[in-house]
Image: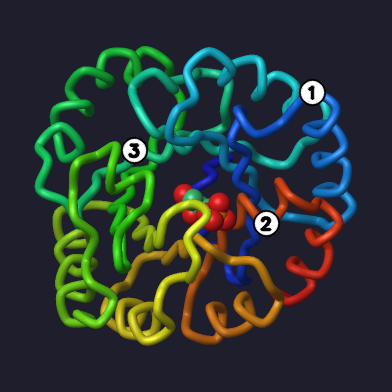
Amino acid sequence: MSLFNEICKPGKKFALLIDPNKYTIHSLIATIFTAEESRIDLILVGGSLVNDRIDSTIEVIKKNTSIPVLLFPGSLMQLSNKVDAILLLSLISGRNPDFLIGNHVLAAPYLKKSGIEIIPTGYILVGEGNSSVEYISNTKPVPEDKIEIAVATAIAGELIGNKLIYLESGSGADQSVNIDVIREVKRNIGIPLIVGGGIKSPYQIDEIIKAGADVVVVGNAVENNSEILESLVKAMR
Ligand code: 1GP
């Protein structure tokens, strides 16, 4: 089964982001149970500072659910061959060569040998700044009022061969990605659009889906309160 093909199938998808540093084993298992009950579509695993808990976290997830798991690596220290597929992220809003090709070269032999499905993904940070991604990657986000720059970046991301575009306002961001940016990017690309960062309410999900997102990613809001998951997923359907 190709996870990319699954993502391309009609219907909006809800993805839960698990940052291994934010969960204990007990909270992780409880959250997976709630995720099963809420019928989420995907689990993403990754974070800014995770290093030694990637494999063990994925093992617990795989043991407790058949929901597909996608690696969302914040760094080379987060590679794992225990997932169903890996988002090969290129930080195309930035101009740091490490996140455009350098890390890809370092990871390539491992990725090739793993035999795991690789999904090249154009990752676009949008917003007013102060996110962990911005600090760690030493890149600037696309300002949220520069819609034409976000659109041109997404088009370029598709043209150079990415299979997905991920619009990100940063984990724990005060605001999710500007709705006009989502709408215009979606209008201008032919590949699936993922949107994440700062999503906390069914209302936001409704707006983001109406603007054209194909996959919505939520992390922080569920870490603080897994009970919220059901209402967030319902807003998708
Ligand atoms: C972060 O898009 C994801 O990379 C999710 O963000 O943690 O703010 O939901 P939140």
Task: Tell me where residue 219 appears, x and y as whole percent.
Answer: 61, 50
SS class, disc 3: strand
The three-letter code of the residue at mark 2 reads Ala
In this picture, residue 128 sits left or right of residue 193? left
Mark closest to the chain's N terminus, 1 or 3: 1
SS class, disc 1: helix
Q: CA distance from mark 1 to mark 3?
A: 27 Å
Circle 3 residues within 10 Å: few <14, some 14–19, many ≥20: many
How packed is label 1: few (under 14 Cα within 10 Å), some, or many (20 or more)? Answer: few
User: Mark 3 highlights which residue?
Assistant: 88
Nearer the viewer's eye, disc 1 or disc 3?
Answer: 1
Secondary structure found at label 2: helix
For mark 1, what is the residue?
25
Tell me which amino acid carries mark 3.
Leu
Give me the C-alpha separation between circle 2 and circle 1. Answer: 18 Å
Dot 2 corresponds to which residue? 221
Measured as percent of width and height from the top left, residue 197 is found at 49, 59
Question: Which label's residue is closer to the chain start, 3 or 2?
Answer: 3
- Residue 100 picture location, percent across and down: 16, 40
Please identify the quarter of the rendering in which residue 178 is found: bottom left
Disc 3 versus disc 2: nearer the observer: 2
Instruction: Report whether the residue tagged 3 is closer than 8 Å to ligand 1.
Output: no
Picture quarter containing residue 192?
bottom left
* On screen, residue 83 above or below 221: above
Q: Are marks 2 and 1 in contact (CB under 8 Å)?
A: no
Residue visible at 75% across and 22% down? 60
